[in-house]
């Protein structure tokens, strides 16, 4: 009984910072329809600013309150600057470009934070009043956690009160229906700036409030944003009450999960998210998102001559390329296959996958396990990769094809995190964080030629499928699902097949990577890898068939170049992405069509 | 023997009987117009016929077989084509590809993954384009078409299925007076050529009396009149419903 009560309170305390961050994310989404990937960065900034301010102030409760509020206020100001300089340029673009640009902001903030505060974790010296305990049912419970528990409902009440004001009425109007709100003369520019200030302030408050428990560190942004995504999605995008309920749910789940099933907590969270979304496709509170109507564009055909020329050049590359550039070229080819797989799903299928690394990782582990456990030669292992990934992708697709837009994206992310968590925690099979090592190419002929044949063949096959009757039907279902049904197409079946094909191709890319690097790690299924794929596709352009290949060359090249030459490569990469998004929203392949 | 037999069709929303005990038949090759003032229950009636809504009670039979409660796709498979009130086509594709997609579905060739769509069913596609009068625009992207042409294309998509029954929800909605006539004439010509029956809802009475063989009038969820256009036009109950009685 005592145990339950203590864990319950711990869970409540944990849910408060989660709620603060998610509340900001969800109101920003409600008004601006932007899924702000950089929201975790604002949380991190709040924590670092809080540390800088609080460590200079006297350690009294009054000063703590002042310091935390100052950190929140400063973060809000940073949010305003961010909104006015960058984000407002993005409101009219596609969700994917917004995701890409805000991810770039996250990269930039990460390096700026590193530059300002240095690489070390910064712990706040805790004065006695912060370290005090309160006896509850004979147990000692941290007093600060009790204070946190009080802050959560307080903030929720303040926000709900704010929603009843005139400002809140405008927020609700915009969340409900942007077009009509605009038609009624609501100035959405000023409202968006204000809402960004509010959201950023809440994130900053959350970041500053965790300081007594957690030291400020550079990994905060990613950890927080993924959890906040989960909370917002479970609660229903744009819903404050939903975010509150969902953060309670997740907070409690974490508190009990850590004690009861420490190994599977993460998996549990994402399973809950998957269950909620499958049962209630619009989250707990059932808020439906009036997503921007898709703006379907025809694809530009790939220039065939260039393709053959490129292939001929690549086939002779071992003769004229030194070892290192050849290694980079190998990486580019695999990236091109991975991006082409993703492109089929996003471009032709109209489904945003935020977790394509799941199939990449499954392919990599499939190939690795076939080699180590079954002693399969490389060609067989490379066959196992797409079969495993494609099969699982088809099964997963059957569950999720009814979801739309942002929810589908989040569920794919959830599944990728499950694969990642399984790879990390099932160490008997996967070696855990140490991964599986010692996978060396064993097939006949040089490995590079295997990569070239399989990636070029895979991309050619994907392009052929895209141009087939099936590909046409898939696009038809994307353009207008209701119409597609009345001419006898089944959008669900078409999409499941797209998941299978795309998953298999991504799996092959993963299998090839396993042999390229000689090892497999959980990171192959991580968020970074999924984002890599998305960036590659977006960089290449969404409306050109050759986009993924061009994107892979550019992105892999850029990445390797920056990694080697620039000390602050995240900053440079982020700036480059931003410049590209703002200057060439149609991707690199779209440049030549600009007037 | 009638092609479509609707009997006792009823559907309520929140206790309001939006469609109340509606029964009628459509004979093969017949053009039937379902008309009535706004809120009469036409669209609800239509959505039950095409499978988007399930009736609370009543039956819908196509050639004697029940189709009520089937999904839109199953209903399509039974030979029912459909046009939308707001024209719905595949906007990113060319006119030709739109028609091709419908024909591919019709001929069960959707799951061919490894042959180019470009060279599949080309003859049939071009024939249908010619019949519907869209050959000149075949390579245009649908997003750039004028509304009248989108409506034509919609008809082509519906006809690709060689339907026995065509359901058209306000085929001339949102069109100018000048554009309506050719569409109305096209519908009539297609019905005569192919022997396909047509059931349409329509607001524009000119169009209705121009092409319909038989007119059904709904008001407040009930069928209040039925008969040839001329008789319905002069029916006092119909006039009252449209002009407002009392």
Image: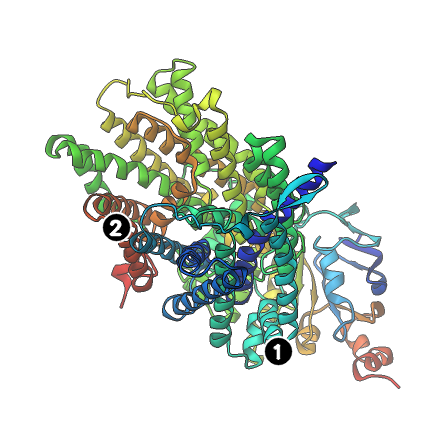
Q: Residue at x 82, y 83 (%)?
A: B244
Q: Is residue A142 left or right of residue A374?
A: right
Name the spot of residue A226 as percent of width and height, x first: 49, 47
Say which of A510 and A283 sits in front: A283
Furthest residue toward top:
A375
Crowding at mark 1 (Cα within 10 Å: few <14, some 14-19, many 20+) = few
To which chain does the residue with label 1 belong?
A: A
Q: Is residue B36 above or below residue A333?
A: below
**On residue A449, which mark appears?**
none
Which numbered dot is residue A166?
Answer: 1
Q: Secondary structure at mark 2?
A: loop
Depth check: B78 or A501 in front? A501
Q: In the figure, residue A311 lies in which quadrant? A: top left
Distance from the alpha carbon under mark 2 to that under mark 1: 44 Å
The picture places residue B22, in percent across and down from the top left corner, at 84, 62
- Which residue is outermost to the bottom? B246
């Amino acid at each position: 009984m005592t145990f339950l009560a203590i864990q319950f309170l711990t869970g409540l305390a944990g849910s408060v910072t989660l709620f603060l961050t998610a509340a900001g994310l969800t109101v920003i989404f409600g008004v601006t329809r932007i899924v702000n990937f950089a929201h975790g960065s604002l949380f991190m900034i709040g924590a670092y600013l809080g540390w800088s301010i609080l460590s200079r102030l006297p350690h009294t409760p009054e000063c703590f309150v002042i310091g935390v509020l100052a950190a929140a206020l400063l973060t809000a100001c940073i949010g305003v600057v961010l909104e006015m300089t960058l984000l407002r340029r993005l409101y009219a673009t596609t969700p994917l470009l917004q995701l890409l640009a805000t991810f770039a902001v996250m990269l930039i903030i990460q390096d700026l934070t590193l530059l300002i505060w240095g690489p070390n974790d910064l712990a706040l010296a805790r004065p006695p009043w912060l370290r005090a305990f309160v006896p509850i049912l004979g147990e000692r419970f941290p007093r600060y956690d009790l204070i946190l528990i009080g802050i959560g409902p307080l903030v929720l009440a303040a926000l709900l009160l704010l929603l009843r004001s005139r400002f809140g009425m405008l927020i609700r109007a915009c969340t409900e229906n942007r077009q009509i709100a605009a038609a009624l003369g609501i100035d959405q520019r000023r409202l968006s700036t204000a809402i960004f200030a509010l959201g950023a302030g809440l994130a900053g408050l959350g970041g500053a409030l965790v300081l007594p428990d957690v030291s400020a560190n550079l990994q905060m942004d990613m950890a927080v944003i993924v959890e906040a995504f989960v909370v917002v999605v479970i609660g229903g995008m744009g819903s404050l009450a939903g975010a509150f309920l969902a953060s309670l749910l997740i907070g409690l789940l974490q508190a009990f999960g850590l004690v009861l099933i420490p190994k599977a907590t993460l998996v549990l969270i994402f399973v809950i998210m998957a269950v909620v979304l499958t049962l209630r496709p619009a989250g707990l509170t059932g808020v439906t998102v009036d997503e921007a109507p898709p703006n379907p564009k025809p694809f530009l055909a790939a220039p065939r001559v260039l393709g053959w020329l490129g292939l001929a050049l690549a086939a002779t590359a071992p003769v004229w390329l030194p070892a290192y550039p050849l290694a980079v070229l190998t990486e580019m080819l695999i990236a091109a296959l991975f991006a082409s797989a993703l492109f089929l799903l996003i471009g032709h299928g109209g489904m945003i996958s935020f977790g394509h690394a799941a199939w990449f990782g499954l392919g990599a582990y499939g190939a690795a396990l076939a080699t180590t456990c079954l002693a399969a030669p490389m060609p067989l292992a490379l066959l196992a990769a797409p079969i495993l990934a494609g099969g699982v992708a088809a099964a997963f697709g059957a569950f999720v094809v009814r979801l739309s837009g942002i929810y589908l994206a989040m569920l794919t992310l959830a599944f990728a995190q499950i694969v990642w968590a399984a790879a990390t925690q099932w160490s008997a099979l996967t070696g855990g964080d140490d991964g599986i090592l010692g996978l060396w190419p064993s097939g006949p002929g040089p490995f590079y030629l295997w990569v070239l044949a399989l990636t070029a063949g895979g991309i050619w096959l994907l392009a052929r499928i895209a141009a087939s009757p099936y590909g046409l039907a898939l696009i038809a279902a994307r353009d207008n699902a209701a119409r597609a049904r009345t001419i006898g197409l089944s959008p669900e079946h078409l999409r499941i097949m797209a998941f299978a094909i795309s998953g298999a191709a991504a799996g092959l890319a993963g299998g090839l990577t396993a042999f390229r690097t000689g090892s497999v790690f959980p990171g192959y299924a991580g968020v970074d890898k999924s984002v890599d794929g998305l960036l590659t596709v977006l960089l290449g352009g969404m409306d050109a068939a050759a986009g993924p290949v061009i994107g892979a060359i550019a992105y892999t090249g850029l990445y390797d170049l920056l990694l080697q030459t620039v000390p602050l490569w995240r900053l440079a990469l982020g700036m480059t992405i931003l410049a590209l998004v703002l200057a060439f929203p149609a991707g690199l392949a779209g440049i030549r069509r600009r007037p | 023997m009638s092609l479509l037999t609707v009997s006792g069709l009823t559907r309520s929303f929140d206790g309001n009987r939006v469609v109340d005990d509606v029964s009628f038949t459509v004979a093969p090759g017949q053009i039937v117009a379902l008309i009535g003032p706004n809120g009469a229950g036409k669209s609800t009636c239509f959505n039950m016929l095409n499978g988007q809504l399930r009736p609370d009670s009543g039956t819908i039979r196509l050639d004697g077989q029940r189709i009520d409660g089937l999904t839109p796709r199953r209903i399509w498979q039974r030979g029912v084509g459909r046009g939308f009130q707001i024209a719905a086509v595949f906007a990113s594709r060319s006119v030709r590809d739109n028609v091709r997609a419908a024909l591919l579905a019709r001929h069960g060739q959707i799951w061919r993954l490894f042959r180019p769509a470009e060279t599949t069913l080309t003859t049939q596609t071009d024939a249908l384009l010619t019949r519907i009068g869209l050959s000149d625009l075949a390579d245009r992207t649908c997003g750039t078409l004028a509304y009248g042409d989108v409506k034509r294309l919609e008809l082509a998509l519906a006809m690709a299925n060689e339907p026995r029954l065509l359901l058209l929800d306000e085929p001339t909605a949102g069109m100018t007076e000048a554009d309506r006539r050719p569409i109305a004439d096209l519908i009539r010509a297609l019905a005569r050529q192919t022997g396909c029956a047509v059931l349409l809802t329509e607001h524009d009475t000119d169009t209705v009396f121009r092409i319909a063989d038989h007119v059904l009038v709904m008001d407040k969820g009930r069928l209040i009149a039925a008969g040839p256009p001329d008789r319905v036009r002069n029916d006092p109950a119909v006039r009252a419903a449209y002009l407002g009685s009392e």
